[in-house]
Image: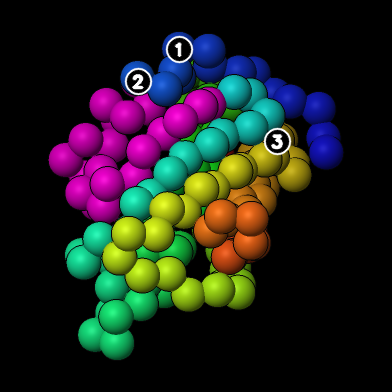
Amino acid sequence: MSSPGPTNPSITAAASVQAIAGSFPGELGIELLEVQDAQVTGRLVVDRRHLHPGGYVHGGVWVAFADTIAAWGTMRNLAPEHGFTTVELKTNVFASAVVGDELLAIGEPLHRGRRTQVWEVRVHKGDRLAANFICTQMVV
């Protein structure tokens, strides 16, 4: 992992949750449990709005959940005058999830540079790795 760039300690759990209120990830019910410079933890309890017609969590929900965790980490590691956007992402889903399942995501930076950040997010359902997500964020 590269050395961290400027961190923004004002990006706390409360500030991060407020930042997504009323937005797409906020409407999904994603909960931030902890945000630090080198780790972000979040939770999603599956309900009907997360399902595809077959009754399992939609692929877009897996991606949105993990991308939101990575975004919180990215925000925490940006200088206050910078923004970012996701420029590349890849997700592998290894397990299904249904209503009532609790998904726990842990995000860690693989690279925190001046122009890009790369984050890996592992989503667990209980003791099982349910999905793995890697994204590149472009600093703007």
The residue labelled by disc 1 is 10
- Front residue (pair 43, 116): 43
Instruction: Tell which of 138 and 18 is nearer to you.
Output: 18
Residue drawn at x 25%, y 60% as measured from the top left: 47
Q: Identify the amino acid type marked 2.
A: Ala
- In the image, residue 118 sits, relative to residue 124, either above or below, namely above
Instruction: Tell me the residue that label 2 is attached to.
Output: 15
In this picture, residue 30 sits left or right of residue 123: left
Q: Nearer the viewer, mark 3 or mark 1?
A: 1
Q: Amino acid at mark 3?
A: Arg
Could you say where residue 99 lies in the image, as x and y percent from the top left?
30, 65
Horizontally, residue 22 falls left or right of residue 138, namely left
Q: Is residue 51 left or right of residue 109?
A: left
- Report how far apart the C-alphas of labels 3 and 1 lie in the structure: 18 Å
Sequence order check, earlier mark of 2 and 3: 2
Residue 20 at x, y percent in the picture: 28, 37
Asked whether the residues under the numbered discs 1 and 2 touch, taking CB atoms below 8 Å apart as contact, a structural biologist would say: yes
Q: How is the image coloured?
A: rainbow
Query: Which residue: 37% across, 27% down?
Result: 16
Which circle marks residue 23 in the picture? none
Density class for disc 2 (Cα within 10 Å; few <14, some 14-19, many ≥20) is few
Q: Is residue 86 visible?
A: no
What residue sits right under mark 3 in the picture? 112
**Quadrant housing residue 50:** bottom left
Question: In the image, is residue 96 part of the stretch drawn in magenta?
Answer: no
Compared with residue 88, is residue 119 higher up or lower down, i.e. above or below? above
The image position of residue 118, as x and y in percent, is: 67, 47
User: Hey, which quadrant is residue 60 in on the image?
Assistant: bottom left
State how many labels appear. 3
Magenta span of residues: 15-35
